[in-house]
Image (spheres, helix red, strand yellow):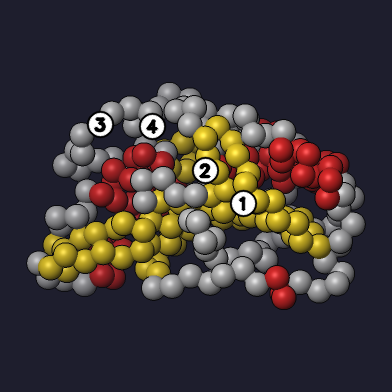
């Protein structure tokens, strides 16, 4: 992949463009597996001028996993940072404008809301017939910058029969794997689908933020998602 922003030194342009990345190459290994999900981007440092006064909010940006394109992370950061000195009469105006711009770039409907708080993960939502595995300290490598990416992986299945040791060994084997957050979660999803007999599986990756943004992919075998946008302590 030829990178426009990621891994390069850039001064903040006046009107930075959003650089999109095709999902086609990354999803070629799905081999007919149907999947659903979202990439949830939490932007903690979005600022603009509200009637001339500085305003800072947290944005939740939800990009469908089946979108034709996604956004290069550094171009997203530059794009959002460019609003710090732009004036708007109300918050809905600026969020609506950003949503339209990102949706057009991704060629899919992208939803954006402002956040005032985050839920914590509640294990009590599981019954004794379902399974939950939580892998703390997941590590992979950014394929562009070669810097480590850290996160926690949540795995939900319709039964509690998954082999925990085998899955943990597989996740451990990815500590030097070069892949973006979305690709890593999809790789885990495919591994479990191909290795174990389970009706429903859902993977949620909660990654630590970079540049004020964390990216949290969810991949599921069903349209109705179990995981929502919660927040880890260290995010």
Q: Distance from label 4 to label 3 (Cα)?
A: 9 Å
The secondary structure type at the circle numbered 4 is loop
What label does residue 233 carry, if any? none
The secondary structure type at the circle numbered 3 is loop
What label does residue 152 carry, if any? 1
- Nearest the camera: 151 or 115? 151
Which residue, given by chain and number where applicable, does mark 4 sit on? 6
Percent x, y of residue 62: 48, 58
| Snapshot quadrant of residue 221 | bottom right
Q: Earlier in the sequence, mark 1 or mark 2?
A: 2
Q: Residues within 10 Å of mark 1 (few under 14, many from 20)?
A: some
Q: Is residue 144 above or below residue 155?
A: above
Percent x, y of residue 52: 9, 67
Q: Distance from label 1 to label 2 (Cα)?
A: 26 Å
The secondary structure type at the circle numbered 2 is loop
Q: Residues within 10 Å of mark 3 (few under 14, many from 20)?
A: few
At x 36%, y 51%, the residue is 212
Q: Distance from label 3 to label 1 (Cα)?
A: 30 Å
Left or right: residue 126 compared with residue 233: right
Residue, far top: 2
The secondary structure type at the circle numbered 1 is strand
Which residue, given by chain and number where applicable, does mark 3 sit on? 10
Q: Distance from label 4 to label 1 (Cα)?
A: 23 Å
Q: Distance from label 2 to label 4 (Cα)?
A: 20 Å
What label does residue 68 carry, if any? 2
């Amino acid at each position: 992949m030829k990178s426009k922003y990621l891994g390069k030194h850039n001064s903040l342009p006046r009107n930075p463009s959003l650089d999109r990345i095709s999902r086609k190459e990354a999803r070629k290994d799905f081999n007919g597996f149907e999947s659903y999900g979202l990439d949830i981007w939490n932007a903690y440092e979005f600022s603009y001028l509200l009637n001339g006064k500085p305003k800072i909010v947290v944005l939740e940006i939800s990009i469908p996993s089946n979108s034709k394109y996604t956004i290069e992370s550094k171009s997203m950061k530059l794009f959002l940072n460019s609003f710090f000195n732009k004036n708007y009469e109300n918050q809905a105006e600026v969020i609506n404008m950003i949503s339209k711009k990102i949706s057009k770039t991704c060629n899919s409907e992208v939803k954006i809301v402002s956040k005032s708080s985050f839920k914590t993960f509640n294990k009590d939502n599981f019954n004794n017939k379902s399974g939950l595995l939580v892998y703390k300290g997941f590590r992979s490598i950014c394929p562009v910058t070669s810097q480590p990416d850290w996160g926690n992986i949540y795995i939900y299945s319709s039964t509690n029969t998954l082999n925990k040791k085998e899955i943990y060994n597989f996740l451990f084997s990815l500590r030097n794997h070069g892949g973006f957050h979305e690709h890593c979660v999809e790789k885990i999803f495919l591994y479990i689908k191909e290795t174990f007999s389970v009706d429903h599986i859902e993977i949620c990756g909660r990654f630590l933020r970079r540049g004020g943004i964390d990216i949290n992919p969810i991949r599921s075998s069903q349209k109705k998602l179990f995981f929502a946008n919660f927040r880890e302590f260290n995010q």
